[in-house]
Amino acid sequence: MPVKIRIVASYDDAYEFTAIPIIALIRQYMDGSIKAGLWMMGHIVDPKRLINDMQEMGIHIETQVI
């Protein structure tokens, strides 16, 4: 059965808000969790770790199952 999830992310600085997910991606890349190459970010990252890392860096994330 399909599940809908609503995710709302917020941060005070729009420039940092753009950079933080990239830093979270680089963390995964640097520890070898993802392989090198040309990939779409959403297809290669561990989503739970990405969200946790973004929260660690100050992004407020709310999730809701609809």
Image: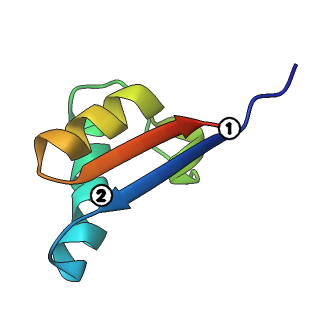
Q: Is residue 9 left or right of residue 60?
A: right
Which quadrant does the N terminus fall into?
top right
Neighbour class for label 2 at 10 Å: few (<14), some, many (≥20)? some
Residue under label 2:
22
The foreground one among 59 and 44 is 59
Which quadrant does the C terminus fall into?
top right
* Residue occupying image coordinates x 60% and y 41%: 43
The answer to whether residue 46 is seen in the rendering is no
Neighbour class for label 1 at 10 Å: few (<14), some, many (≥20)? few
Say above or below: 23 vs 13.
above
Measured from the top left, where is residue 7 in percent x and y?
50, 48
Amino acid type, mark 1? Ile
The foreground one among 32 and 9 is 9
* Residue occupying image coordinates x 46% and y 39%: 63
Residue under label 1:
66
Say above or below: 45 vs 41.
above
